[in-house]
Image: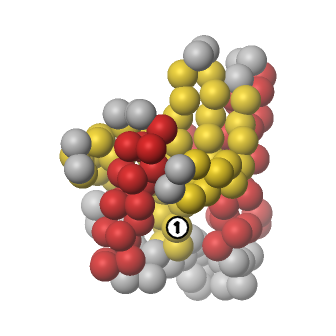
Amino acid sequence: MDNYQAYVRKRGFRAFDVKNLKESAWHYSLDGYIYFFIERLGGKVLVEVPTGRGRVDILILYKNKEYIIETKRYTDNSYYKAGKKQLAEYLKSEGLREGYYVVFSNVHQDEDKLKEKEKIEGKTIYSYIIRTNLKTATGNV
């Protein structure tokens, strides 16, 4: 996820229409990025996979292990926290101990906490905030 954060920052406004892009476009950017690497390593990337608790955004199957990534667009702190609980429920239903939470935000800045690791309902959640308020050629966000 650190590499994806760097990729988005490096590509910036040239690759992403930061003013008009919908959450689904950021989601597809992430799963495409992951897909390229995981498929080359012999793994599988599945999107919108049904589970006992709903649909996980991205499921990675690699070397007989499963990894779940839940994605959201940041709207406010309560929605942000609710997404973590949602991921913890997915992890419970799939019998996994840890998962990844990727949140696209146009309000966070570099000085904000952009990644964290925490336990929620006994599950380890790795959270990454991907800044989407990127500078344009004129320097505006």
Q: Taking the image as drawn, is residue 137 in sight? A: no
Q: Residue 113, position in %: x, y?
A: 28, 61
In the image, residue 58 sits, relative to residue 35, either above or below, namely below
- In the picture, measured across the screen, residue 16 lies left or right of residue 73, that is right
The residue at which mark 1 appears reads as 72
Near-viewer residue (12 or 47)? 47
Look at the image and name its color scheme: secondary structure
- In the picture, measured across the screen, residue 34 lies left or right of residue 14, that is left
In the image, residue 115 sits, relative to residue 104, either above or below, namely above
Q: Quadrant of residue 133?
A: bottom right
- In the picture, measured across the screen, residue 122 lies left or right of residue 77, that is left
Q: Quadrant of residue 128?
A: bottom left
At 31% from the left and 78% from the top, the residue drawn is: 77
In the image, residue 37 sits, relative to residue 93, either above or below, namely above
* Disc 1 residue type (three-letter): Lys
Near-viewer residue (15 or 47)? 47
At 71% from the left and 77% from the top, the residue drawn is: 21
- In the picture, measured across the screen, residue 103 lies left or right of residue 110, that is right
Q: Residue 55, position in %: x, y?
A: 61, 56
At 60% from the left and 15% from the top, the residue drawn is: 63
Label 1 Cα crowd, 10 Å radius (few <14 / some 14-19 / many 20+)? many
Q: Residue 64, position in %: x, y?
A: 59, 16
Quadrant of the rendering where the C terminus is positioned: bottom right
Q: Residue 97, position in %: x, y?
A: 35, 33
In the image, residue 9 sits, relative to residue 13, either above or below, namely above
At 50% from the left and 78% from the top, the residue drawn is: 106
